[in-house]
Image (cartoon, rainbow, N blue to C red):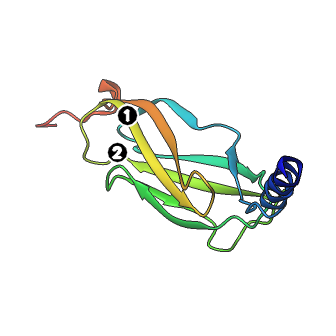
Amino acid sequence: MKLRAFIMLVALLFGLSVSAKKYPEIKFEKTTIDFGTFSMDEPIQKAVFRFTNVGKAKLVINYVHASCGCTVAEYPKDYIAPGASGEITVTYNGFGKIPGKVKKNVQIFTNSKSQMTRIFVVGEMTDVPASKKTKSGE
């Protein structure tokens, strides 16, 4: 009787493991890209985040959300097959912003098991060099 119960339990566990849902999985080459130092007179900076679907099902990026209005992300709207790659382009626009350190994040919501992944852009925006500033009264 105990042997029969054990065999049924093993069969049940095996059946559950075989029927386990297959998920996509997004894997980025880098999760942070550094713009380095850039000047206020060139306030728009772009970073390209490359990723691969290392899972076993089609990956869908449902939505992306940037941490502020100065940061925009472009992403694939179609599914990404298992083993296939894609790109998310993040654009930071520092126009009208105060010079200093920049750290912005973008949340990526997908159909993967973890559902949300975060990527970052960092850098430092400096003031316009004095040689490029015009003096008033001239």
Of residues 68 and 57, the one nearer the viewer is 57
Q: Are marks 2 and 1 in contact (CB under 8 Å)?
A: yes
Q: Secondary structure at mark 2?
A: loop
Q: Amino acid type of disc 1?
A: Val
Q: Is residue 117 above or below residue 112?
A: above
Question: Height in image: 33 above or below 18?
Answer: above
Which picture quadrant has residue 103? top left
- CA gap, disc 2 and disc 1: 9 Å
**In-front residue for pair 64/124:** 64
Q: Amino acid at mark 2?
A: Gly
Decide: few, some or many residues near mark 1? Use Cα within 10 Å; few <14, some 14-19, many ≥20: some
Q: Would residue 59 appear left or right of 88 to someone viewing this image?
A: right
Q: How many marks?
A: 2
Query: Which picture quadrant has residue 127?
Result: top left
The image shows residue 86 at horizontal and vertical percentages of 72, 58
Q: Of the two numbered discs 2 and 1 on the same chain, state the one appearing first in sequence.
A: 2
Q: Which mark is residue 102?
A: 1
Residue 5 position within the rendered picture, expressed as x and y whole percent measured from the top left: 81, 53
Asked if residue 42 can be seen in this view, the reply is no
Q: Callout 2: 10 Å neighbours few (<14), some, many (20+)?
A: many
* Residue depicted at x 50% and y 58%: 73
Please name the residue shown 31% across and 48% down the image.
Answer: 95
Foreground mark, 2 or 1? Answer: 1
Q: Nearer the viewer, residue 11 or 62?
A: 11
Side of 100 relative to 84 (left or right): left
Q: Secondary structure at mark 1?
A: strand
Residue found farthest to the bottom: 78
Give the residue at mark 2.
94
Q: Nearer the viewer, residue 118 or 134?
A: 118
Is residue 12 in sight in this rendering? yes
Which residue is found at the position 34% from the left and 45% from the top? 94
